[in-house]
Image: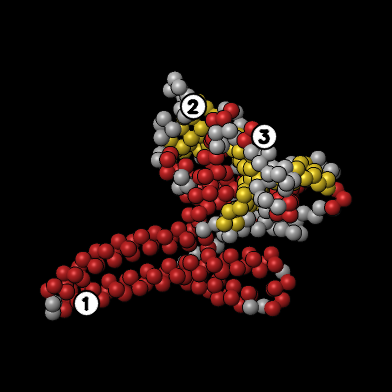
Amino acid sequence: MDIDSAKKEYDKLLEQLSDPELISDADKFEMLSKKKNRLEKIIEKAKEIEEVKNKIEEDKSIITAREDTELSLMAETEINQLSERQKKLEEELDNLLENGAEKENPHARQNFASQKLGGQAVIVEIRAGTGGEESALFAADLFRMYSRYGQSQGWKERTLDSRPSELGGFKEVVFELRNGDVFSKMVFEGGVHRIQRIPTTEKLGRIHTSTATVAVLPKPKKTDVKINPQDLRIDFYRSSGPGGQNVNKRETAVRLTHLPSGLVVTSQTERNQLQNKENAMAILEARLLEKKEVADLEKMGEKRKAQIKWAKRAEKIRTYNFPQDRVTDHRVKKSWHDIEGIMNGKLEPIIEELRKVDEAII
């Protein structure tokens, strides 16, 4: 796609979005709106490049005129700066044209088998795996990593449930990310994460290996999952902290049991029953949708299964090696350094590499 094609497609989208009947088709309206936003970024970037080019031509005219030596020197300096700016903008435009114009990320538009997945929100579950307390601390590190990455993307975050450990880690933490193109970026994070480092509790300086699992579930729309109230058993109890001690005098924590499937979810992060119940329902709906669609995957071909990596909770996907300052993603067999920066939310290079490879498979 080139700029002219982008402009023509943008004008066409504006006509489609102005159709009064479109408002009744929420999925199509959402899809066209996202495409419109992507095309707007392309057009704005092209406009910015044109403005830089015009400024360079103005500076060249000043130099050619030779009316003011000092002004000419300033123009030469500005040309160098603007040329670098132009080069960077053109690279950004090329990336936009390549990745964001003609095709959407396949994961952002597929709701598993139904292909109605909304990309705005996901529910992320992080659980401590092997490694005892060090694993719980690693789970907390992953939670912080995704939180900071989400902040850099302008996403909103809400904790739905958590079970803290004795030393400030998490045995489990469940949270929601929304307000942007969340799913198409977070989709690749599901699986087993492994860390190799010397724990703070290690007195002999030995390197320990611990794991934590991450599940990334699209948050269902209201029409995706329907739960019959008669299929639920609701229990209220006092929320607890590390070691199991009760931290609330009132029974504000909520446990939902979905009788047909046997799924059990809890929420105890809020101080009132209603909010905890809503949080628990959000988790339950996401898990029911996952359960249904994972079953649907069994009916699909191997190539399609390979594309939907987020359904594989047990797959070891990444190792964080602190002694070697290296993060390795085993799916693309590639490593990155600056592990401290990555653990502080600088995930974009890894995620973009995964998206690029995934799109090449399609």
Of badges 1 and 2, the one in the foreground is 2
Q: Amino acid at mark 3?
A: Gly
Q: CA distance from mark 2 to mark 3?
A: 22 Å
Check disc 2 and report its element: helix, strand or loop. Answer: loop
* Residue underneath mark 3: 244
* Residue underneath mark 1: 61
Q: Is residue 154 above or below residue 262?
A: below
User: Which residue: 42% across, 69% down?
Assistant: 46
Residue 196: x %, y % from top left = 49, 30
Of badges 1 and 3, the one in the foreground is 3
Residue 248: x %, y % from top left = 68, 44
User: Which residue: 55% across, 37% down?
Assistant: 168
* Residue underneath mark 2: 201
N-terminal of the pair, mark 1 or mark 2, is 1
Please rate how many residues cluster around mark 2, counting C-alpha atoms within 10 Å: few if below 14, some from 14 to 19, many from 20: few
Residue 123: x %, y % from top left = 64, 49
Please rate how many residues cluster around mark 3, counting C-alpha atoms within 10 Å: few if below 14, some from 14 to 19, many from 20: few
Q: Amino acid at mark 2?
A: Thr
Residue 136: x %, y % from top left = 57, 34
